């Protein structure tokens, strides 16, 4: 829950409130919260009940009980009266973040942390390997029975860490690195580009 949502919950519990009271209660910048309250007022979620809104005599607001709708907070914008939702981080970005943090990770570890499907993680990692972003330390499989192989998993090692933005896969070409504004082509199996 972000601070705007905390503030909204606080306001709903109060008979009336001042901007500074709520901003202090949720540890938010007063001017930022003042703008938020003005937006809520413009959308009909709160109304001024008293006060001239000057230094020493601030506006006193109350939440409109007649408005059953809840305001939406967080990322997103509006286009006319319709709200545009921006998606969260992509699966590739979540995988990239996990690699940057851990430097060495297994597919199951990345799946557990990111909640991205194992198939998606595996495909992205194999593509990153073809562009020399990562290498895989695969477990030794010679002279081992199937029972001994259970649980063996390759460890993926980050070799090229270029920044916070995930490289974007360009099928058949390589990866567009958003951080360096550069295309890293796939490397052929024999090591040549």
Image (cartoon, helix red, strand yellow):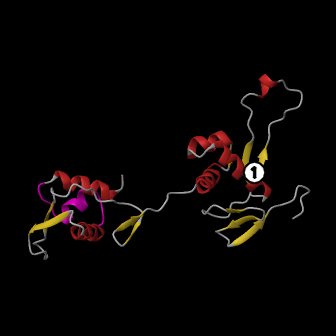
Q: Is 130 left or right of 180, judged from the image as shown?
A: right
Relative depth, front residue between 4 and 84: 84
Q: Is residue 5 above or below residue 36?
A: above
Q: Is residue 166 above or below residue 104?
A: below
Q: Residue at x 40, y 68 (%)?
A: 77
> At which x and y percent is residue 64?
16, 59
Residue drawn at (22%, 53%) of the image: 10
Asked whether 3 or 187 is in front, the reply is 187
Q: Is residue 133 left or right of residue 4?
A: right
Tell me residue 109's x, y (percent).
63, 41
| Residue where numbered disc 1 is placed | 126
Quarter residue 112 falls in: top right
Q: How many marks?
A: 1
Give the farthest residue toward the right.
190
- The quadrant holding residue 43 is bottom left
**Magenta span has 17?**
yes
Under circle 1, the secondary element is helix
- 75 to the left or right of 94: left
Residue at 78% x, 59% y is 131
Magenta stretch, residue numbers: 15-30
Q: Does 25 lie within the magenta span?
A: yes
- The C terminus is located in which quarter? bottom right
Q: Residues within 10 Å of mark 1 (few under 14, many from 20)?
A: some
Which of the 4 image quadrants contains residue 138?
A: top right
Q: Horizontally, is 126 left or right of 8 in the view?
A: right
Q: Nearer the viewer, residue 48 or 26?
A: 48
Residue 139 pos. (x, y %): 80, 37
Give the percent coordinates (x, y) of residue 80. 36, 73
Residue at 66% over, 48% down:
120
């Amino acid at each position: 829950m972000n601070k705007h949502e905390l503030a909204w919950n606080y306001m709903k519990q109060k008979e009336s409130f001042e901007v500074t009271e709520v901003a202090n209660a949720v540890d938010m910048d007063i001017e930022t919260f003042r703008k938020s309250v003005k937006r809520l007022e413009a959308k009909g979620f709160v109304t001024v009940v008293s006060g001239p809104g000057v230094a020493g005599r601030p506006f006193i607001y109350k939440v409109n009980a007649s408005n059953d709708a809840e305001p939406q907070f967080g990322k997103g914008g509006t286009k006319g009266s319709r709200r545009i939702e921006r998606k969260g981080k992509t699966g590739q970005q979540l995988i990239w973040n996990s690699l940057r943090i851990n430097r060495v990770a297994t597919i199951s570890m990345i799946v557990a942390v990111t909640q991205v499907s194992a198939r998606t993680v595996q495909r992205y990692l194999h593509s990153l390997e073809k562009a020399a972003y990562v290498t895989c330390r695969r477990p030794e499989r010679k002279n081992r029975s199937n029972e001994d192989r259970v649980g063996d998993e390759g460890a993926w090692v980050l070799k090229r860490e270029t920044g916070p933005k995930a490289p974007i896969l360009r099928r058949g070409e390589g990866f567009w690195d958003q951080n360096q504004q550069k295309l890293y082509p796939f490397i052929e199996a024999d090591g040549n580009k």
